[in-house]
Image: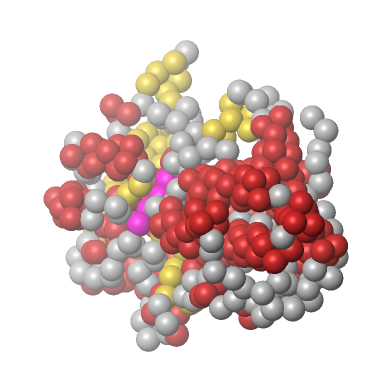
Amino acid sequence: MATKYFTTPIYYVNDRPHIGHAYTSLATDVMARWARLSGEEVFFLTGTDEHGQKVEKAAQDAGMDPQGFTDRVSQHFRDLAATMGFSNDDFIRTTEPRHKAACQALWEELVRRDEIYLGHYEGWYAVRDEAFYGPDETEERDGKRFAPTGAPVEWVREPSYFFRLSKWGPWLLDFYRENPDFIAPASRRNEVMRFVEGGLQDLSISRTSFTWGIPVPGDPAHVMYVWLDALTNYITAAGYPDTSAERWRFWPADVHVVGKDIVRFHAIYWPAFLQAAGLAPPRRVFAHGWWTNEGQKISKSLGNVIDPVTLVEEYGLDPVRYFLLREVPFGSDGDFSRLALIGRLNGELADTLGNLANRTLSLIQRNCGGALPAAAEAAEGDAELISGLGSLPARVGGHLARQEFHLALEAILAEARAANGYITLQAPWALKKTDPVRMAVVLRHLHTALRVFATVLQPFMPGTMAAMLDQLGVPAEGRGLDALAVPLPEGTALPPPAPLFRKVEA
């Protein structure tokens, strides 16, 4: 069986989760569910990043010890995963013993290969970003210096271990050229390549000014740089350092889904660490954009942080899942608008898809005794609908392989609109009197269309599509992509239809 390994970033536990966290994990969840639907064996990982100076400070501000603080905040991310219906196979925390063992094993392997040396770090460091910045990357405003992200930086001088990142610059550029799909979208790839082409400096990978981190093997006065610690989670969960572990067969990861603010760590540092340790790099890093809220940048100070749990309570889980991946291309920034969400829910889900299902299934109940009509060959008036349905799963799969979630959904909606046009043109309610045999054929084709839509939409809206497949009489074992080739038997009893989506007042 083919394997697929999908990951979210591990989320930093200095605050509660927001819509950006839900967005990243949702995209990863849809890819994982689609791969399972395709018959592949999937490992889907998410979790929390719990070390570093920023977490230590957040715990102090909360009047808690770091472990107790991370225990509490990490649980919020577990709760979000449950609320949003994410199907992750593991949830990793960087405070777990398995992760400490993996990080220290990776460190020792890098030392063994002479990729680490002891020196002194002196330069600009942003606690908020947990990142080092060169002098040409910072700017002074009102007597203070800031990173490109807007985070304040402080001058740091302390003993530090360094990773020989500079030697890996030529290899990275060759790797990017030989693997043009490694970084996506193209704008992020270009950004990373320009940075590497500018020359890489050796990377400080330990700190001595705080203690909340994984101790460096043999030198506990140092703790590992939080990004070396965090990135290692992807191989920890796969069993590292035991490369004979059952889960190691999933490595390398197929897609790391990340926000655009952390693409440098995943596309430069991470493949260099792995290559230096003799391990395969991941196959793809996809960096998505950020959300604004009704045109405004989202920030705690503005009080406009979007709580995904509140959205789910207000509009329902599956409409929120659908909207987040439908509204904007995944690699671009997008604006969250309640009016836009309501428009998608009412126009696309309730009217286009839900109404088609209700009309079709109600007609089968009234005119066919609630039993599925016999399968029939496509007549001239059916060919366009049937052809579009036949190619739809492959088209959706192609879009998802490129993380084009909005295009996958548009392809499905285009066929649903065509099916609505078909039912209007064929008018099976009129055929009941003039040609009941043709009526049964038309209703069977519409049932087939609904089955295809519900099947391919399962990764996006698992709960609602399970309900639709129930109404269509599709058994649990008949809901994979391969099962679409097996027609349901004539006479399959269909339950009375019930509304799948509720319309919302704007």
Q: Quadrant of residue 458?
A: bottom right
Closest to the observer: 273 or 426?
A: 426
* Side of 51 relative to 362 (left or right): left
Image quadrant where residue 182 sits: bottom left
- Please provide percent x and percent y for residue 366: 85, 62
Q: How many marks?
A: 0
Q: Quadrant of the N terminus?
A: bottom left
Relative to 28, residue 14 above or below: above
Q: Residue furthest front?
A: 434
Q: Does residue 182 lie above or below 154 as drawn?
A: below
Q: Position of residue 350 (x, y in %)?
A: 74, 45
Q: Report whether 176 appears left or right of 317.
A: left
Quadrant for the C terminus in the image: top right
Instruction: Find the magenta span and give its range.
Output: 284-289
Is residue 61 toward the left or the right of residue 209 in the image?
right
Q: Is residue 287 magenta?
A: yes
Q: Is residue 57 highlighted in magenta?
A: no
Look at 80% across and 68% down and name the residue there: 368
Residue 267 shows up from this direction:
yes
Q: Residue furthest top?
A: 142
Report the front residue among 448 and 75. Answer: 448
Residue 17 seen in this snapshot = no
Residue depicted at 62% across the width and 73% down the height: 375
Q: Is residue 130 left or right of residue 274?
A: right
